[in-house]
Image (cartoon, coloured by chain):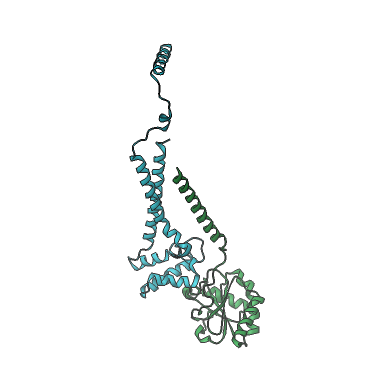
Chain colours: A cyan, B green
Amino acid sequence: MTGRLPLAGLALAAALLAAAAALAFAAISSSGNSGTLEQRAHAVAATLKCPVCHDLSAADSPAPVAQQMRAQITEELRAGRTPDQIRADFVGAYGEWILLSPPQQGLGLLPWLAPGLLGMAGLALVAVTLRRWSRPHEADPTDAAAPQLTAADRRLLDKALAAARGEVD
Amino acid sequence: MGWRRWTALAAVVVGVGLTALLLGSGLGHDPNRLPATLVGRQAPDFDLQAIDGGGQRAHLAALHGEVVILNFWASWCVACQTEEPALRDAFERYRDRGVTLIGVSFQDSATDARAYAASRRIPWMLLDDPGSRTGLAYGVSGLPETYFIARDGTVSYKAVGPVNQALVNQQLRRLQAEGAA
């Protein structure tokens, strides 16, 4: 039992850290702002929902309106507008539901904070587990509670054990 | 052991609290109800050509001082056909009372839209929207959608789905009363 607990804790900590790293990576990779005009337009479109589809981004949807969104985004980037300005226009027309990522305010902050919180929880779990491993083994409380044998009892016990061994042999 | 119990209790309380918060927020929100973000704001301007190819144009800024009903539609849209009598009635009754009814085709080919309008003898101005620029600026996500624009150019009301006569009359009477006040 004592050997399993640290292993389970370590596995949980590793899972939490992996989840946090994945979320952080996704957040960083989705905010890319470099590359060719097409790549930049695709990156902006990937942050917007296709307004006539279910759960598809404007970058991935084959719907004509998504194609028109991509064309409009490309045109506006070419005209020197920033991705944030373009997104703000779509939010102004459609509302915040057009954003694939939640807004960084109110309840929308939760998914942004979750990677950090999960990471901290994972590190805390690792620290506690390592501390428990490195601590010298304490005496088994059941041993301390056991009554000490007297010399007579010890002799009786040895005799009984020898007799038992003799029966077995 | 005491701190472990407290930690576990705190974790359960935080977990239950967060779940309740998320569920409360999610369940209190109707996913089918789209926010009308443009209501109360200046209507996006447009300058579009009529689908009949006659060269006639409509520029929203030039209609300042009039109430405008802006209806997004398509020839393939069945729901658009159900609202056509209400729009026809509004056009006939309010055309000489400072109300302009404009249809903007959305996600439709100019040829299909033109053929449909001719077959139904639609009397109000129908505009072509290349690249859906105007539809995207108004946040159109389904058809039909109808915007009621006040005399000062602000969006007063957005109707998602087919409008009926009662709704159109109610909105126009309100806008005309606001204009007269």
Is B163 situated above or below A118?
below
Tell me which residue sits at (45%, 69%) in the image.
Answer: A69
Q: Is residue A61 visible?
A: no
Q: Residue at x 55, y 73 (%)?
A: B112
Residue B161 seen in this snapshot: yes
Q: Quadrant of residue A149?
A: top left
The one nearer the camera, B120 or A45, is A45
Quadrant in the picture for the C terminus of chain B: bottom right
Rendered position, B145 above or below B21:
below
Screen quadrant of the N terminus of chain B: top left
* B175 with respect to A148 (left or right): right
Along the line of sight, the residue nearer the viewer: A157 or B93? A157
Of the pair A103 and B126, the residue shown nearer to us = A103
Rendering coords of residue A36 (x, y %): 33, 67
Q: Quadrant of residue B99?
A: bottom right
Give how far across and how far down residue A107 sits, in percent. Answer: 48, 62
Relative placement, left or right, of B71 versus A76 is right
Horizontally, is A3 left or right of B146 in the view?
A: left
The image position of residue B77, as x and y in percent, is 58, 69
Residue B5: image location, x then y, percent: 47, 45
Q: Residue at x 33, y 37 (%)?
A: A136
